[in-house]
Amino acid sequence: MVGHYRLSEFGFDLPAGAHIVAPETVRAVEGATALIEAAEAKAAGIVKDAEQAYQEERERGYRDGLAKARLEAFERLLRESATLDAELHRVEGELSRLVLACVRKLVDGFDDRAKAEATVRSALKQMRREKRAELRVALSQYGHFSEAIGAITAQFPEVELIDVVEDAGLEAPRVIIETGIGRVDGDLGSNIAELEAILRRVVAGEEESAPLPEAATP
């Protein structure tokens, strides 16, 4: 039988030259060699398994790290979105207050007569198909409208006649215009209050809005 054996690894120290080794010694060497080869193969398998396990752990760590980074980015996005929503809500509230302040300032720039006339003109625009109407005004404005109604109706040639009637239950600048199809109750002060209520609902949404300035009564 021919084979190569690493005798020095088994404690054999032979001088140079040809030697005859006893069969039992060869069998021992063969057994030892087989054990070494098996151990080396097992060690190589362990190393391979360890390398694979290390690679798998490395990949898992990368995936976990990537998932964590994505989660943190999502949480940061949610926080930024909440901050933006809160800021937009605040800006909407400020804008609503600014709109109300501008409307009040504009309305307050007119006296009761101008406010009442503006209401009458607005109502007549909605009633262009009506030929006759009755205008009910406060006692303090009856004289004014008795004289001014002609100039007002001149802007609405389709309206043939408007009767001006005193109404003790009205306070200037509130007026009421009645026709055959209905009536228009006009009061710029109450209209501003309605506008404020609408803006409150729009700005508040499902949450309680910040208090807006109280509506000024003309």
Image (tube, rainbow, N blue to C red):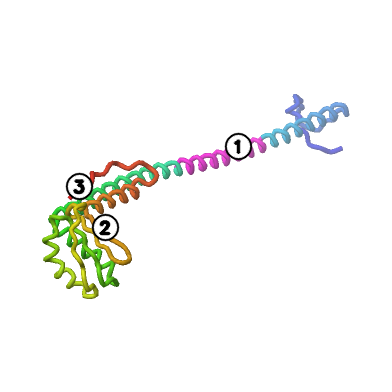
- Given the image, on which type of amino acid does mark 1 rest? Tyr
Q: Which residue is mark 1?
A: 54
Give yes or no for residue 12 being in the magenta stretch.
no
Q: Which residue is mark 3?
A: 216
Residue with the most extreme bottom position: 157
| Cα separation between marks 1 and 2 | 84 Å
Could you say whether the residue bearing mark 3 is in a helix, strand or loop? loop
Q: Residue at (29%, 61%) from the top-left corner?
A: 183
| Cα separation between marks 3 and 2 | 19 Å
Q: Main secondary structure of the magenta part?
A: helix
Q: Residue at (28%, 71%) from the top-left corner?
A: 130
Task: Tell me whether the residue at label 3 lies in contact with that at label 1, contact meaning CB atoms closer than 8 angstroms.
Answer: no
Looking at the image, residue 156 lies above or below residue 192: below
Q: Where is residue 170 shown, x and y percent of the image?
A: 20, 53
Query: Is 70 on the left-hand or right-hand side of 147?
Result: right
Q: Residues within 10 Å of mark 2 (few under 14, many from 20)?
A: few
Could you say whether the residue bearing mark 2 is in a helix, strand or loop? strand
Segment colored magenta: 47-72
Task: Tell me whether the residue at label 3 lies in contact with that at label 2, contact meaning CB atoms closer than 8 angstroms.
Answer: no
- Of mark 3 and mark 1, the one earlier in the sequence is 1
